[in-house]
């Protein structure tokens, strides 16, 4: 079976980002965004999704984290779409439920080319690892839009850190299930015959 990889670079007046992803990986992550909490979340996603991830990102953090977080989601989505290709033989759907102490996150994914995000849950603090909490929904919306993924993300708990980390871990696990190749299958899992 071929190793599925995607690598994308994007440079704008606000950010410079490179993302490389290998779906048949071991969960190894080398992430440098300039935002340690985002590095930690992306590393957790890769580890529990069992894909290898490389991210090198720089941006106008002196303004605020918005551009860097959004653009990282965009480029990760593009790299993921490149790695999945036309979707031949993939499972397509994935689900994961991840508890982290008092917090619980559930993620349902469809890697079928239709971008959509349903985000059910909220954070209580004005900042989470130096990132305004609403940016996490924006990150996943950007990722889904550029990867062609429908994602339903639902989470609850008391600790914002636990809730956020459970979301990233659940997304990784659901993604691993969705992009898994079904042995002996080469068709695109859609009645249309294409995504």
Image: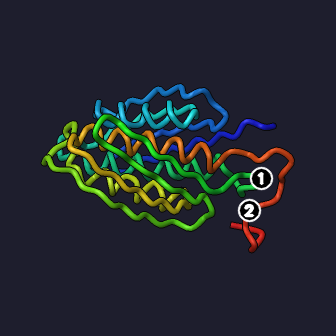
Q: Secondary structure at mark 2?
A: loop
In the image: residue 192, left or right of residue 126: right
Mark 1: secondary structure: loop
Residue 73, given in percent of the width and then of the height, sits at: 42, 50
**Residue placed most toward the observer, 96 or 129:** 96
Q: CA distance from mark 2 to mark 1?
A: 7 Å
Image: 182 above or below 152 = above
Quarter of the rendering containing residue 103: top left
- The reply to whether discs 2 and 1 touch (Cβ–Cβ < 8 Å) is yes
The residue where tag 1 is placed is 89
- View extreme (front): residue: 102
Residue 52 position by quadrant: top right
Residue 67, percent from left and from top = 30, 51
- Tell me residue 124's x, y (percent): 16, 50
| Local crowd size for mark 2, using a 10 Å CA cut-off: few (<14), some (14–19), many (≥20) | some
Q: Which part of the image, by quadrant, shows the N terminus?
A: top right
Residue at 36% from the left image edge and 52% from the top image edge: 139
Task: Work out which residue is located at the far bottom of the displayed protein and give it.
Answer: 192
Residue at 48% from the left image edge and 59% from the top image edge:
151
Residue 9 in picture, x, y percent from top left: 51, 43
On residue 134, the disc is none
- State which tag comes first along the sequence, 2 or 1: 1
Q: Nearer the viewer, residue 15 or 128?
A: 128
Above or below for 42 versus 107 = above
Q: Residues within 10 Å of mark 1 (few under 14, many from 20)?
A: some
Q: What residue do we see at 45% from left, 60% from top?
A: 152
The C terminus: image quadrant: bottom right
Disc 2 target residue? 189
The residue lying at 74 percent from left, 46 percent from top is 181
Q: Of 73 and 91, which appears nearest the observer?
A: 91
């Amino acid at each position: 079976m071929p190793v599925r990889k995607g690598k994308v670079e994007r440079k704008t007046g606000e950010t410079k980002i490179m993302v490389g992803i290998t779906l048949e990986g071991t969960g190894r992550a080398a992430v440098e965004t300039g935002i340690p909490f985002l590095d930690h979340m992306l590393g957790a996603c890769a580890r529990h999704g069992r894909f290898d991830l490389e991210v090198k990102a720089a941006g106008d953090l002196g303004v605020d984290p918005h551009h860097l977080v959004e653009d990282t989601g965009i480029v990760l989505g593009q790299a993921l779409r490149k790695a999945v290709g036309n979707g031949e033989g993939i499972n397509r759907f994935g689900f994961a439920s991840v508890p982290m102490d008092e917090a619980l996150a559930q993620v349902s994914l469809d890697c079928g080319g239709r971008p959509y995000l349903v985000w059910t849950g909220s954070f209580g603090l004005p900042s989470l690892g130096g990132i305004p909490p609403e940016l996490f929904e924006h990150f996943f919306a950007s990722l889904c839009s550029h990867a062609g993924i429908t994602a339903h993300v639902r989470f609850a708990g008391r600790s914002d850190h636990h809730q956020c980390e459970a979301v990233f871990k659940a997304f990784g696990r659901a993604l691993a299930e969705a992009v898994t190749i079904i042995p002996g299958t080469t068709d695109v899992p859609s009645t249309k015959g294409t995504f």
